Image (spheres, rainbow, N blue to C red):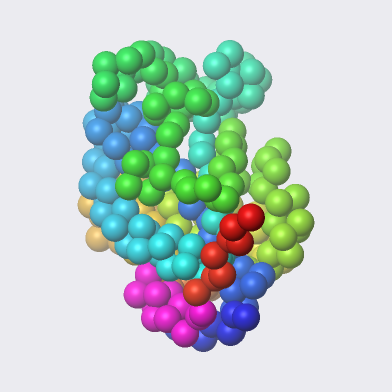
């Protein structure tokens, strides 16, 4: 039986029941965090995204140890771009300018396409790959709740709290957290498991601004170390029975 987590966070500590909590991994996929992906191809610095891989891997391992559900979200469009939006929609126009749908080459030399489903480009980063029992959902807008199965899955499992990791902080992470808050989920964003290239070199980054917004109005902000420390008191999940 799990015990309530006493989690250090801003703006104040939280008590969370692991039994109704899920870990959300937002868009930590090759197009955003790997060499040869969409961001890298566009000349965007991805070092801050690569830096969250290690702490996120530790959080994933801790969550799996106690049997906490893990949900991966992946940004990816249909091969015919039918879910990209109408011809003049901002979602379609901005993504096409960025190169979505164009041919790309995976590290093994095979042909792939930027942000297209079921290609190397939309696979989860290899260091964080899903395991048996994890749920993987595609999304075609910034929020993980927009026209996806996410809310139905969370309700089916009785989830009330979300531990949020991923990229990018001010776009897909914040969009998903906002939608989650509107649906009465309590979200804890782990600051060192989220990253944002936009404004990375400014005195005050978009990453920091989003975290401030989240902890002020939309949820809580904590760190991987605080999460891991809180999880130390949790009993290991029972291994599946062998029949």
Viewer-nearest residue: 108 or 165 = 108
Residue 69 x/y as whole percent: 58, 60
x 54%, y 70%: residue: 237
x 43%, y 75%: residue: 227
Which region is colored magenta?
224-235
Viewer-nearest residue: 207 or 123 = 123
Is 229 a magenta residue?
A: yes
x 47%, y 67%: residue: 65
Residue 232 x/y as whole percent: 42, 81
Examine the rendered structure and indicate whether residue 11 appears above or below residue 36. Answer: below
x 41%, y 19%: residue: 113
Total labels: the figure holds: 0
Is 152 a magenta residue?
A: no
Examine the rendered structure and indicate whether residue 180 appears above or below residue 31. Answer: below
Residue 157 x/y as whole percent: 72, 60
Q: Name the side, left or right, on which 146 lies relative to 65.
A: right
């Amino acid at each position: 039986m799990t015990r309530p987590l006493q989690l250090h966070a801003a703006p104040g500590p939280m008590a969370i029941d692991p039994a109704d909590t899920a870990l959300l991994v937002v868009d930590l996929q090759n197009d955003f965090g790997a060499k040869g992906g969409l961001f890298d191809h566009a000349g965007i610095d991805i070092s801050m995204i690569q830096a969250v891989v290690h702490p996120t891997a530790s959080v994933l391992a801790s969550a799996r140890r106690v049997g906490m559900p893990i949900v991966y979200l992946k940004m990816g469009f249909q091969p015919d771009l039918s879910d990209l939006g109408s011809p003049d929609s901002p979602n379609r126009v901005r993504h096409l300018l960025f190169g979505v749908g164009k041919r790309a080459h995976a590290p093994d030399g095979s042909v792939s396409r930027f942000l297209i489903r079921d290609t190397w480009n939309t696979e989860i980063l290899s260091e964080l790959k899903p395991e048996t029992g994890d749920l993987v959902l595609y999304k075609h807008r910034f929020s993980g709740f927009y026209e996806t199965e996410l809310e139905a899955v969370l309700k089916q499992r009785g989830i009330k709290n979300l531990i949020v990791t991923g990229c990018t902080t001010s776009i897909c992470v914040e969009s998903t957290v906002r939608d989650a808050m509107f649906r009465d989920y309590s979200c804890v964003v782990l600051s060192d498991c989220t990253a944002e290239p936009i404004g990375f070199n400014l005195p005050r980054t978009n990453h920091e601004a989003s975290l401030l917004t989240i902890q002020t109005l939309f949820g809580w902000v904590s760190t991987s170390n605080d999460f891991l420390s809180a999880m130390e008191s949790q009993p290991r999940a029972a291994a599946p029975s062998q029949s």
